Amino acid sequence: MDGMMQYPPGDSRMIDKIVHQLKSQGIFDQFRKECLADVDTKPAYQNLHQRVEGSVTGFLASQEWRPDLNKNQLRDSLRKHIH
C-alpha cells in the first residue's frame, strides 16, 4: 500500500487502491465468507431467507414461461413483488 499517504482521507482513489489490495491478496473474499458464515447461523437471517424463498417460489409459480420472456422485466416485477 505504498503511496497511500498522498491521498486525503476518504479519497476514492485511495479507497480503490485499498480494495484492490484486499481483493488481490484474497483477504476480501475471506472476510466476506466469514461474515456470511456468521450471518447464516442467525435465526433472524434464516427466517428472512425462508420468507424470501417462499415469496420468490410463489411469484415464479404464477409466471407463464414464453420463449420471448424478458428476464429484466421479470426481475423488476419480482423486486416489486418482494417489496
Image: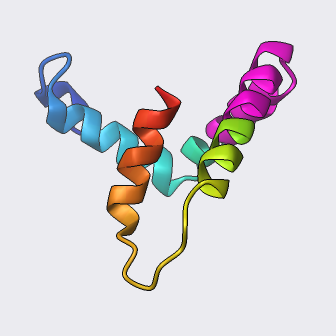
The magenta-colored residue range is 31-52
Name the spot of residue 39 as percent of width and height, x first: 75, 24
* Residue lying farthest to the bottom in this orientation: 67
The answer to whether residue 12 is left or right of residue 18 is: left
Compare residues 68 and 7 and report the one nearer the observer. 68
Name the spot of residue 63 as percent of width and height, x first: 55, 60
Instruction: Give the position of the N terminus as an image quadrant.
Output: top left
Q: Assess whether residue 54 is covered by the magenta stretch.
A: no
Q: Assess whether residue 44 is covered by the magenta stretch.
A: yes
Q: Residue at x 13, y 27 (%)?
A: 7
The answer to whether residue 70 is left or right of residue 59 is: left
Name the spot of residue 28 as percent of width and height, x first: 55, 42
Q: Is residue 37 above or below residue 48?
A: below
Q: Residue at x 70, y 48 (%)?
A: 57
> How many marks can you see?
0
The answer to whether residue 79 is left or right of residue 18 is: right
Q: Is residue 21 visible?
A: yes
- Which quadrant would residue 72 be assigned to in this image? bottom left
Give the main secondary structure, helix, strand or loop, of the magenta stretch: helix
Compare residues 10 and 72 and report the one nearer the observer. 72
Q: Is residue 42 above or below residue 28?
A: above
Q: Residue at x 80, y 21 (%)?
A: 47
Q: Residue at x 71, y 33 (%)?
A: 36
Name the spot of residue 13 as percent of width and height, x first: 16, 38
Q: Is residue 59 above or below residue 41?
A: below
Compare residues 31 and 14 and report the one nearer the observer. 31
- Which quadrant would residue 5 be assigned to in this image? top left
